[in-house]
Image (cartoon, grey):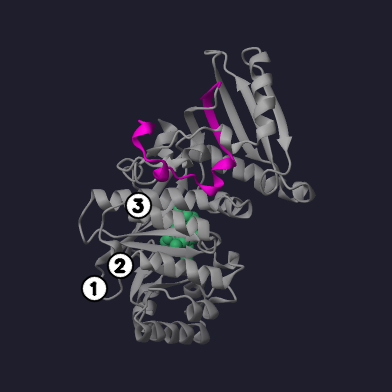
Amino acid sequence: MLSELKPEELREFAFAAADLLATTDAYGRILTAYGDGALLHHPTADRLVGKEILPLISQSDIRRLRDDLWALGPGRRVCWDDPGAIEGGRRIVVQRNTADPNTFSWQVARTPRSGKVRSERASEMLSERFRGAIASGRLKAARQPIVDTTSLKVSHYEVLARFEGEDSPAGLICAAEETGQIAHLDYIMVHAACARLSAIPDAAFRLAVNISGESVQRLEIVRELCAVIAGHEFQRDRLILEVTESARIQDAAAAARGISMLRRQGVQVALDDFGAGAASFAYLRDFEVDGLKFDGSFLRASPDNPRSMALIRGVARMCADLNIASVGECVETAADHRLLADAGVRYAQGYLFGRPIIDEQFFVKGRTAQAMAAA
Ligand code: C2E
Ligand code: CA
Ligand code: CA
Protein backbone atom coordinates (compact mmCIF):
# COMPACT_ATOMS: atom_id res chain seq x y z
CA MET A 1 0.00 0.00 0.00
CA LEU A 2 2.64 2.43 1.07
CA SER A 3 4.79 1.85 -1.97
CA GLU A 4 1.89 3.21 -4.05
CA LEU A 5 2.56 6.62 -2.60
CA LYS A 6 5.10 8.85 -4.26
CA PRO A 7 7.83 9.92 -1.85
CA GLU A 8 6.85 13.55 -2.24
CA GLU A 9 3.35 12.61 -1.20
CA LEU A 10 4.55 11.44 2.15
CA ARG A 11 3.91 14.15 4.60
CA GLU A 12 5.10 14.13 8.10
CA PHE A 13 3.39 16.39 10.56
CA ALA A 14 5.53 18.65 12.63
CA PHE A 15 4.03 17.36 15.83
CA ALA A 16 4.17 13.70 14.90
CA ALA A 17 7.39 13.15 16.73
CA ALA A 18 5.76 13.92 20.03
CA ASP A 19 3.04 12.03 21.83
CA LEU A 20 3.20 9.06 19.55
CA LEU A 21 1.97 5.64 20.60
CA ALA A 22 2.67 3.01 17.98
CA THR A 23 3.18 -0.70 17.65
CA THR A 24 6.02 -1.52 15.33
CA ASP A 25 8.05 -4.50 14.28
CA ALA A 26 11.66 -4.70 15.36
CA TYR A 27 12.72 -2.51 12.47
CA GLY A 28 10.51 0.36 13.51
CA ARG A 29 7.88 -0.08 10.82
CA ILE A 30 4.54 0.99 12.17
CA LEU A 31 1.99 -1.79 12.52
CA THR A 32 -0.64 0.20 14.38
CA ALA A 33 -0.67 3.72 15.76
CA TYR A 34 -2.82 5.30 18.41
CA GLY A 35 -3.40 8.74 19.78
CA ASP A 36 -1.40 11.44 18.19
CA GLY A 37 0.40 8.77 16.22
CA ALA A 38 -2.66 8.67 14.05
CA LEU A 39 -1.75 12.16 12.94
CA LEU A 40 0.92 10.56 10.82
CA HIS A 41 -1.92 10.54 8.43
CA HIS A 42 -1.75 11.28 4.75
CA PRO A 43 -4.27 14.03 3.98
CA THR A 44 -4.93 13.18 0.36
CA ALA A 45 -4.47 9.40 0.44
CA ASP A 46 -6.66 9.52 3.55
CA ARG A 47 -4.85 6.82 5.42
CA LEU A 48 -2.09 6.34 7.88
CA VAL A 49 1.33 6.86 6.45
CA GLY A 50 3.38 4.03 7.87
CA LYS A 51 6.56 5.95 7.74
CA GLU A 52 9.27 4.32 9.78
CA ILE A 53 9.31 5.48 13.33
CA LEU A 54 13.07 5.23 13.58
CA PRO A 55 13.80 8.41 11.59
CA LEU A 56 11.94 10.24 14.35
CA ILE A 57 14.57 9.11 16.79
CA SER A 58 18.20 10.20 16.85
CA GLN A 59 21.00 7.95 15.56
CA SER A 60 22.48 7.24 18.98
CA ASP A 61 19.02 6.32 20.25
CA ILE A 62 18.57 3.90 17.38
CA ARG A 63 21.79 2.04 18.20
CA ARG A 64 20.78 1.85 21.81
CA LEU A 65 17.30 0.68 20.85
CA ARG A 66 18.47 -2.14 18.61
CA ASP A 67 20.73 -3.56 21.33
CA ASP A 68 18.26 -3.15 24.15
CA LEU A 69 15.25 -4.34 22.20
CA TRP A 70 16.22 -7.97 21.75
CA ALA A 71 17.52 -8.19 25.29
CA LEU A 72 14.04 -7.48 26.66
CA GLY A 73 11.88 -10.29 27.95
CA PRO A 74 8.27 -10.31 26.70
CA GLY A 75 6.18 -7.72 28.56
CA ARG A 76 9.29 -5.86 29.78
CA ARG A 77 10.05 -2.28 28.87
CA VAL A 78 12.88 0.23 28.64
CA CYS A 79 12.45 3.95 29.11
CA TRP A 80 14.77 6.93 28.76
CA ASP A 81 14.68 10.66 28.36
CA ASP A 82 16.07 12.49 25.37
CA PRO A 83 16.36 16.06 26.63
CA GLY A 84 17.52 17.90 23.52
CA ALA A 85 15.47 16.29 20.78
CA ILE A 86 12.45 18.54 20.52
CA GLU A 87 11.00 21.47 22.35
CA GLY A 88 10.97 20.47 26.00
CA GLY A 89 12.65 17.11 25.37
CA ARG A 90 10.94 13.77 25.07
CA ARG A 91 10.60 10.44 26.82
CA ILE A 92 10.81 7.20 24.90
CA VAL A 93 9.25 4.02 26.24
CA VAL A 94 9.47 0.72 24.41
CA GLN A 95 7.86 -2.50 25.52
CA ARG A 96 8.22 -5.99 24.05
CA ASN A 97 4.72 -7.35 23.51
CA THR A 98 3.72 -10.49 25.35
CA ALA A 99 1.23 -11.84 22.80
CA ASP A 100 3.63 -11.47 19.89
CA PRO A 101 7.23 -11.10 21.13
CA ASN A 102 8.36 -10.10 17.64
CA THR A 103 6.50 -6.83 18.00
CA PHE A 104 7.04 -3.85 20.27
CA SER A 105 4.91 -1.00 21.56
CA TRP A 106 6.45 2.43 21.57
CA GLN A 107 5.54 5.62 23.20
CA VAL A 108 7.31 8.85 22.39
CA ALA A 109 6.01 11.58 24.65
CA ARG A 110 6.96 15.13 25.49
CA THR A 111 8.67 15.47 28.82
CA PRO A 112 7.54 18.37 30.95
CA ARG A 113 9.76 21.42 30.90
CA SER A 114 11.55 20.96 34.20
CA GLY A 115 11.01 24.44 35.64
CA LYS A 116 7.28 24.37 35.22
CA VAL A 117 6.63 20.79 36.20
CA ARG A 118 4.73 21.46 39.38
CA SER A 119 2.47 24.21 38.13
CA GLU A 120 1.69 22.29 34.97
CA ARG A 121 0.90 19.03 36.67
CA ALA A 122 -2.86 19.56 36.77
CA SER A 123 -3.07 20.61 33.16
CA GLU A 124 -0.83 17.71 32.18
CA MET A 125 -3.17 15.28 33.84
CA LEU A 126 -6.00 16.89 31.93
CA SER A 127 -4.11 16.80 28.66
CA GLU A 128 -3.39 13.13 29.32
CA ARG A 129 -7.15 12.64 29.44
CA PHE A 130 -7.46 14.69 26.26
CA ARG A 131 -5.05 12.37 24.45
CA GLY A 132 -6.74 9.31 25.92
CA ALA A 133 -10.18 10.49 24.82
CA ILE A 134 -9.02 11.02 21.25
CA ALA A 135 -7.12 7.72 21.09
CA SER A 136 -9.97 5.64 22.48
CA GLY A 137 -12.66 7.18 20.29
CA ARG A 138 -14.36 8.98 23.17
CA LEU A 139 -14.22 12.18 21.14
CA LYS A 140 -17.60 13.00 19.67
CA ALA A 141 -19.05 15.99 17.91
CA ALA A 142 -22.29 17.85 18.61
CA ARG A 143 -24.05 20.21 16.22
CA GLN A 144 -25.99 23.33 17.12
CA PRO A 145 -28.03 25.39 14.65
CA ILE A 146 -27.33 29.05 13.92
CA VAL A 147 -30.41 30.83 12.61
CA ASP A 148 -31.19 34.06 10.78
CA THR A 149 -32.59 36.46 13.38
CA THR A 150 -35.33 37.64 10.97
CA SER A 151 -36.40 34.57 8.99
CA LEU A 152 -35.40 32.04 11.71
CA LYS A 153 -34.09 29.81 8.91
CA VAL A 154 -31.04 27.70 9.78
CA SER A 155 -27.97 29.29 8.23
CA HIS A 156 -25.45 26.66 9.36
CA TYR A 157 -24.42 24.49 12.30
CA GLU A 158 -21.59 24.95 14.74
CA VAL A 159 -19.68 21.74 15.47
CA LEU A 160 -18.68 21.41 19.13
CA ALA A 161 -16.26 18.80 20.47
CA ARG A 162 -17.64 16.47 23.11
CA PHE A 163 -15.58 14.14 25.26
CA GLU A 164 -17.54 11.25 26.71
CA GLY A 165 -18.00 11.72 30.41
CA GLU A 166 -17.41 15.49 30.27
CA ASP A 167 -20.26 18.01 30.29
CA SER A 168 -18.24 20.59 28.43
CA PRO A 169 -15.01 20.22 26.45
CA ALA A 170 -13.78 23.49 27.95
CA GLY A 171 -11.48 21.95 30.62
CA LEU A 172 -9.78 19.52 28.28
CA ILE A 173 -9.53 22.11 25.52
CA CYS A 174 -7.98 24.62 27.88
CA ALA A 175 -5.40 22.06 29.06
CA ALA A 176 -4.66 21.12 25.46
CA GLU A 177 -4.10 24.78 24.66
CA GLU A 178 -1.80 25.22 27.61
CA THR A 179 0.30 22.23 26.64
CA GLY A 180 0.43 23.10 22.95
CA GLN A 181 -1.73 20.20 21.81
CA ILE A 182 -4.88 21.95 20.64
CA ALA A 183 -3.71 21.83 17.02
CA HIS A 184 -4.30 18.07 17.09
CA LEU A 185 -7.97 18.57 17.87
CA ASP A 186 -8.28 21.41 15.38
CA TYR A 187 -6.79 19.21 12.68
CA ILE A 188 -9.09 16.28 13.48
CA MET A 189 -12.23 18.46 13.59
CA VAL A 190 -11.44 20.30 10.35
CA HIS A 191 -10.60 17.03 8.63
CA ALA A 192 -13.87 15.42 9.72
CA ALA A 193 -15.89 18.52 8.77
CA CYS A 194 -14.35 18.56 5.28
CA ALA A 195 -15.14 14.85 4.88
CA ARG A 196 -18.71 15.43 6.04
CA LEU A 197 -19.21 18.37 3.68
CA SER A 198 -17.95 16.38 0.70
CA ALA A 199 -20.13 13.41 1.67
CA ILE A 200 -23.24 15.63 1.78
CA PRO A 201 -23.09 17.85 -1.32
CA ASP A 202 -26.08 19.97 -0.28
CA ALA A 203 -25.37 23.71 -0.56
CA ALA A 204 -27.68 24.39 2.38
CA PHE A 205 -25.64 22.14 4.69
CA ARG A 206 -22.89 24.33 6.11
CA LEU A 207 -20.65 23.78 9.10
CA ALA A 208 -18.71 26.04 11.43
CA VAL A 209 -15.73 24.47 13.20
CA ASN A 210 -13.78 26.00 16.06
CA ILE A 211 -10.06 26.42 15.72
CA SER A 212 -7.93 27.88 18.43
CA GLY A 213 -6.18 31.24 18.17
CA GLU A 214 -3.13 29.22 19.16
CA SER A 215 -3.35 27.27 15.87
CA VAL A 216 -3.92 30.14 13.43
CA GLN A 217 -0.68 31.83 14.41
CA ARG A 218 1.38 28.70 13.70
CA LEU A 219 2.35 28.52 10.06
CA GLU A 220 3.00 24.78 10.01
CA ILE A 221 -0.46 24.08 11.44
CA VAL A 222 -2.18 26.48 9.03
CA ARG A 223 -0.41 24.74 6.15
CA GLU A 224 -1.72 21.38 7.33
CA LEU A 225 -5.24 22.76 7.66
CA CYS A 226 -4.99 24.21 4.13
CA ALA A 227 -3.78 20.82 2.82
CA VAL A 228 -6.72 19.05 4.44
CA ILE A 229 -9.19 21.52 2.92
CA ALA A 230 -7.51 21.26 -0.49
CA GLY A 231 -7.73 17.46 -0.30
CA HIS A 232 -11.54 17.47 -0.14
CA GLU A 233 -14.11 18.42 -2.73
CA PHE A 234 -16.87 20.70 -1.52
CA GLN A 235 -18.14 24.22 -2.12
CA ARG A 236 -15.60 26.13 -0.01
CA ASP A 237 -17.95 28.69 1.49
CA ARG A 238 -19.83 25.86 3.18
CA LEU A 239 -17.05 25.70 5.76
CA ILE A 240 -16.64 28.41 8.38
CA LEU A 241 -13.70 28.41 10.77
CA GLU A 242 -14.41 30.15 14.08
CA VAL A 243 -11.22 31.44 15.67
CA THR A 244 -11.74 30.96 19.41
CA GLU A 245 -9.48 31.83 22.30
CA SER A 246 -7.96 34.77 20.58
CA ALA A 247 -6.42 35.55 23.98
CA ARG A 248 -3.89 32.91 23.03
CA ILE A 249 -2.71 34.96 20.06
CA GLN A 250 0.73 36.28 20.95
CA ASP A 251 1.71 37.09 17.39
CA ALA A 252 -1.13 39.03 15.77
CA ALA A 253 0.76 39.48 12.50
CA ALA A 254 1.28 35.71 12.19
CA ALA A 255 -2.39 35.12 13.01
CA ALA A 256 -3.44 37.65 10.35
CA ARG A 257 -1.30 35.78 7.80
CA GLY A 258 -2.75 32.44 8.93
CA ILE A 259 -6.29 33.77 8.54
CA SER A 260 -5.50 35.08 5.03
CA MET A 261 -4.01 31.73 4.02
CA LEU A 262 -7.13 29.92 5.17
CA ARG A 263 -9.38 32.41 3.40
CA ARG A 264 -7.40 31.96 0.20
CA GLN A 265 -8.60 28.36 0.30
CA GLY A 266 -12.06 29.85 -0.12
CA VAL A 267 -13.37 28.94 3.33
CA GLN A 268 -14.85 31.58 5.63
CA VAL A 269 -13.21 32.70 8.84
CA ALA A 270 -15.07 34.19 11.79
CA LEU A 271 -13.79 35.86 14.94
CA ASP A 272 -15.31 34.07 17.95
CA ASP A 273 -15.81 35.44 21.47
CA PHE A 274 -15.88 39.06 20.33
CA GLY A 275 -15.86 41.37 23.34
CA ALA A 276 -14.43 38.77 25.72
CA GLY A 277 -10.82 39.87 25.32
CA ALA A 278 -9.22 43.27 25.44
CA ALA A 279 -7.89 43.10 21.88
CA SER A 280 -11.19 42.37 20.12
CA PHE A 281 -11.37 45.69 18.28
CA ALA A 282 -7.74 45.53 17.16
CA TYR A 283 -8.38 42.03 15.82
CA LEU A 284 -11.42 43.21 13.94
CA ARG A 285 -9.26 45.88 12.36
CA ASP A 286 -6.27 43.64 11.57
CA PHE A 287 -7.84 40.30 10.68
CA GLU A 288 -9.75 40.02 7.45
CA VAL A 289 -12.68 37.96 8.64
CA ASP A 290 -16.04 37.04 7.14
CA GLY A 291 -17.88 36.81 10.43
CA LEU A 292 -17.92 37.93 14.04
CA LYS A 293 -19.50 36.22 17.03
CA PHE A 294 -20.40 38.27 20.07
CA ASP A 295 -19.28 36.57 23.24
CA GLY A 296 -22.19 35.14 25.25
CA SER A 297 -21.36 37.43 28.18
CA PHE A 298 -22.25 40.40 26.00
CA LEU A 299 -25.84 39.29 25.74
CA ARG A 300 -26.02 38.40 29.44
CA ALA A 301 -25.03 41.94 30.38
CA SER A 302 -27.18 43.74 27.86
CA PRO A 303 -30.85 43.97 28.87
CA ASP A 304 -30.16 46.31 31.80
CA ASN A 305 -27.04 47.88 30.43
CA PRO A 306 -27.63 50.60 27.88
CA ARG A 307 -23.89 50.86 27.08
CA SER A 308 -23.70 47.20 26.28
CA MET A 309 -26.78 47.53 24.07
CA ALA A 310 -25.27 50.50 22.26
CA LEU A 311 -22.06 48.54 21.69
CA ILE A 312 -23.89 45.57 20.19
CA ARG A 313 -25.89 47.88 17.97
CA GLY A 314 -22.76 49.78 16.89
CA VAL A 315 -20.71 46.66 16.17
CA ALA A 316 -23.62 45.03 14.31
CA ARG A 317 -23.90 48.16 12.17
CA MET A 318 -20.17 48.14 11.50
CA CYS A 319 -20.35 44.45 10.52
CA ALA A 320 -23.13 45.24 8.06
CA ASP A 321 -21.02 48.06 6.56
CA LEU A 322 -17.98 45.78 6.23
CA ASN A 323 -20.06 42.88 4.91
CA ILE A 324 -19.17 40.79 7.95
CA ALA A 325 -21.81 38.35 9.22
CA SER A 326 -22.64 39.04 12.88
CA VAL A 327 -23.78 36.28 15.23
CA GLY A 328 -25.08 36.45 18.80
CA GLU A 329 -24.75 33.35 20.98
CA CYS A 330 -26.25 32.04 24.21
CA VAL A 331 -29.73 33.05 23.11
CA GLU A 332 -31.94 31.35 25.69
CA THR A 333 -35.11 33.43 25.77
CA ALA A 334 -37.41 35.19 23.35
CA ALA A 335 -36.23 38.45 24.97
CA ASP A 336 -32.60 37.61 24.07
CA HIS A 337 -33.67 36.99 20.50
CA ARG A 338 -35.62 40.25 20.31
CA LEU A 339 -32.67 42.17 21.68
CA LEU A 340 -30.33 40.82 18.99
CA ALA A 341 -32.85 41.30 16.19
CA ASP A 342 -33.53 44.89 17.33
CA ALA A 343 -29.79 45.60 17.48
CA GLY A 344 -29.41 44.42 13.87
CA VAL A 345 -27.40 41.28 14.63
CA ARG A 346 -27.88 39.01 11.65
CA TYR A 347 -27.69 35.50 13.13
CA ALA A 348 -28.39 33.91 16.49
CA GLN A 349 -27.48 30.69 18.28
CA GLY A 350 -28.60 29.26 21.59
CA TYR A 351 -30.85 26.89 23.47
CA LEU A 352 -33.91 28.83 22.27
CA PHE A 353 -33.29 27.55 18.73
CA GLY A 354 -31.72 24.20 19.54
CA ARG A 355 -29.22 22.65 21.91
CA PRO A 356 -26.05 21.02 20.66
CA ILE A 357 -26.97 17.46 19.62
CA ILE A 358 -24.43 14.67 19.11
CA ASP A 359 -23.86 13.98 15.43
CA GLU A 360 -23.08 10.25 15.36
CA GLN A 361 -22.10 10.44 11.69
CA PHE A 362 -19.52 13.18 12.11
CA PHE A 363 -16.50 10.91 12.38
CA VAL A 364 -17.91 8.10 10.28
CA LYS A 365 -17.75 9.16 6.65
CA GLY A 366 -14.24 10.48 6.49
CA ARG A 367 -11.58 8.16 7.86
CA THR A 368 -10.29 10.61 10.37
CA ALA A 369 -7.40 10.18 12.71
CA GLN A 370 -9.84 9.25 15.43
CA ALA A 371 -11.57 6.64 13.32
CA MET A 372 -8.23 5.13 12.51
CA ALA A 373 -7.14 5.16 16.09
CA ALA A 374 -10.30 3.32 17.05
CA ALA A 375 -9.88 0.79 14.20
P1 C2E B 1 -17.79 28.60 21.94
O1 C2E B 1 -17.14 28.41 20.63
O2 C2E B 1 -18.10 30.00 22.34
O3 C2E B 1 -19.08 27.69 21.89
C1 C2E B 1 -20.33 28.06 22.41
C2 C2E B 1 -20.56 27.42 23.74
O4 C2E B 1 -21.82 27.87 24.26
C3 C2E B 1 -20.68 25.91 23.67
O5 C2E B 1 -20.13 25.40 24.86
C4 C2E B 1 -22.19 25.69 23.64
O6 C2E B 1 -22.58 24.39 24.10
C5 C2E B 1 -22.65 26.77 24.58
N1 C2E B 1 -24.03 27.19 24.32
C6 C2E B 1 -24.73 27.16 23.17
N2 C2E B 1 -25.95 27.72 23.33
C7 C2E B 1 -26.01 28.12 24.62
C8 C2E B 1 -27.03 28.79 25.41
O7 C2E B 1 -28.10 29.14 24.93
N3 C2E B 1 -26.72 29.04 26.69
C9 C2E B 1 -25.55 28.68 27.26
N4 C2E B 1 -25.35 28.97 28.55
N5 C2E B 1 -24.55 28.08 26.57
C10 C2E B 1 -24.79 27.81 25.25
P2 C2E B 1 -19.21 24.15 24.88
O8 C2E B 1 -19.67 23.15 23.87
O9 C2E B 1 -19.09 23.73 26.30
O10 C2E B 1 -17.81 24.70 24.35
C11 C2E B 1 -17.04 25.58 25.10
C12 C2E B 1 -15.92 26.14 24.30
O11 C2E B 1 -14.98 25.13 23.97
C13 C2E B 1 -16.35 26.69 22.95
O12 C2E B 1 -16.90 27.97 23.13
C14 C2E B 1 -15.03 26.71 22.20
O13 C2E B 1 -14.25 27.81 22.57
C15 C2E B 1 -14.38 25.47 22.72
N6 C2E B 1 -14.59 24.37 21.77
C16 C2E B 1 -15.64 23.54 21.62
N7 C2E B 1 -15.43 22.65 20.63
C17 C2E B 1 -14.20 22.94 20.12
C18 C2E B 1 -13.39 22.36 19.07
O14 C2E B 1 -13.77 21.42 18.37
N8 C2E B 1 -12.16 22.93 18.85
C19 C2E B 1 -11.72 24.00 19.60
N9 C2E B 1 -10.51 24.50 19.31
N10 C2E B 1 -12.45 24.54 20.57
C20 C2E B 1 -13.68 24.03 20.84
CA1 CA C 1 -17.40 28.91 18.57
CA1 CA D 1 -18.06 32.05 21.53
Question: At which x and y percent is residue 34?
Answer: 50, 33
User: At numbered mark 1, what does the secondary structure look like: helix, strand or loop?
Assistant: loop
Q: Which residue is drawn at 57% across and 32% down?
A: 54
- State the residue position of label 3: 193
Q: What residue type is labelled 3?
A: Ala
Q: Give the range drawn in magenta.
A: 1-26
Q: Disc 2 to disc 1, how far (Cα)?
A: 8 Å
- State the residue position of label 1: 151
Q: Disc 3 to disc 1, how far (Cα)?
A: 26 Å
Q: Is residue 72 above or below residue 200?
A: above
Question: At which x and y percent is residue 183?
Answer: 52, 53
The stretch drawn in magenta includes residue 11: yes
Q: Residue at x 70, y 32 (%)?
A: 60
Q: Which amino acid does label 1 sit on?
A: Ser
Q: In this view, does 153 lie above or below 34?
A: below
Q: Can residue 332 be seen in this view?
A: no
Question: At which x and y percent is residue 149?
Answer: 30, 74
User: At numbered mark 2, what does the secondary structure look like: helix, strand or loop?
Assistant: strand
Q: Do the residues labelled 2 and 1 touch (CB within 8 Å)?
A: yes
Numbered mark located on residue 50 in the image: none
Q: Nearer the viewer, mark 3 or mark 2?
A: 3
Numbered mark located on residue 147 in the image: 2
